[in-house]
Image (cartoon, helix red, strand yellow):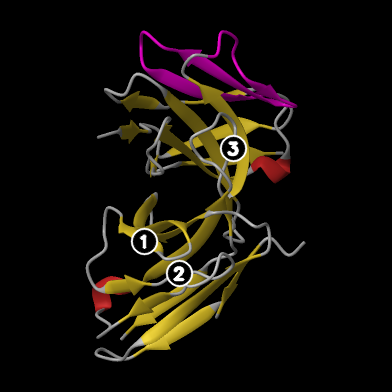
Amino acid sequence: NAGVTQTPKFRILKIGQSMTLQCTQDMNHNYMYWYRQDPGMGLKLIYYSVGAGITDKGEVPNGYNVSRSTTEDFPLRLELAAPSQTSVYFCASSSSPGRGTDTQYFGPGTRLTVL
Amino acid sequence: AQKITQTQPGMFVQEKEAVTLDCTYDTSDPSYGLFWYKQPSSGEMIFLIYQGSYDQQNATEGRYSLNFQKARKSANLVISASQLGDSAMYFCAARSQGGSEKLVFGKGTKLTVNP
């Protein structure tokens, strides 16, 4: 199993450009998440999804959009990139987070710089 | 809302010694889970250990143990017999159980293991 994969690994955007960060998991997990990690900080939740067709906002959703058309994929869309969106983006998935030890499995991250 | 506080920006330990990384949490939820993740310099997030709020015993996973003091709302990570490979950022996180999907992270502690 590949687990959670993210593409690209690195990207430089100009202010105002748009892009989509891809995330795919092969563990048949229902729950998927997008986090951002700013330098020297912990992770903050951007959006999450509890299943195909269902998404909801996290702590810092402004400037982002998501969709969940399949169980496997959870792309994150940045519209009109701004320098404040320079960060490392992590995608994660879990099967049933409300139960006990079930943890979130993280992808390797995408390092995004907006200039 | 939950809040995680990690008061140690950086910690140093000698190889083969034990080290405790502090974590306090603030939550009004009756049931919750506490997690520790390791982030090495390569950037990935690695799950280490989990503690449920109703678990009677402190969690242990190999060299990792969680010193859970519910009344003090603390969930400190203890690493025994430190190894050079333990040098990394360590994040404490909390999640409500029974419906909420969000992991809330602390700002992390950078651990350096000296030879």
Do labels 3 and 2 touch, CB within 8 Å?
Answer: no
Q: Chain of mark 3?
A: A
User: Horizontal and vertical percent for residue B50?
Assistant: 57, 29
State the residue lying farthest toward the front: A53
Mark 1 crowdedness (10 Å alpha carbons): few <14, some 14-19, many ≥20: some
Q: Position of residue A59 (x, y in %)?
A: 27, 53
Does label 2 or label 1 sit earlier along the sequence?
A: 1
As drawn, the label of residue B70 is none
Q: Which residue is mark 1?
A: A55
Labelled pair 2, 1 in contact (Cβ < 8 Å): yes
Q: Which residues are magenta?
A: B55-79
- Residue placed at 46% from the left, 77% from the top? A21
Left of A81 or right of it: where is A37?
right
Residue at image x 28%, y 83%? A79
Question: Residues at marks 3 and 2, common chain?
Answer: yes
Q: Earlier in the sequence, mark 3 or mark 2?
A: 2
Q: Residue at x 24, y 80 (%)?
A: A82
The foreground one among B26 and B9 is B26
Three-letter amino acid code at the position of disc 1: Thr
> In the displayed structure, does residue A111 sit left or right of residue A40?
right
| Kind of element beneath mark 1 | strand
Q: Are marks 1 and 3 in contact (CB under 8 Å)?
A: no
Residue under mark 2: which chain is it in?
A
Could you tell me which quadrant the C terminus of chain B lies in?
A: top right
Question: What number is the disc on residue A68?
Answer: 2
Q: Which residue is mark 3?
A: A102
CA distance for labels 2 and 1: 7 Å
| Front tag of 3 and 2 | 2
Q: Amino acid at mark 2?
A: Arg
Quarter of the image for residue B14 reads top right
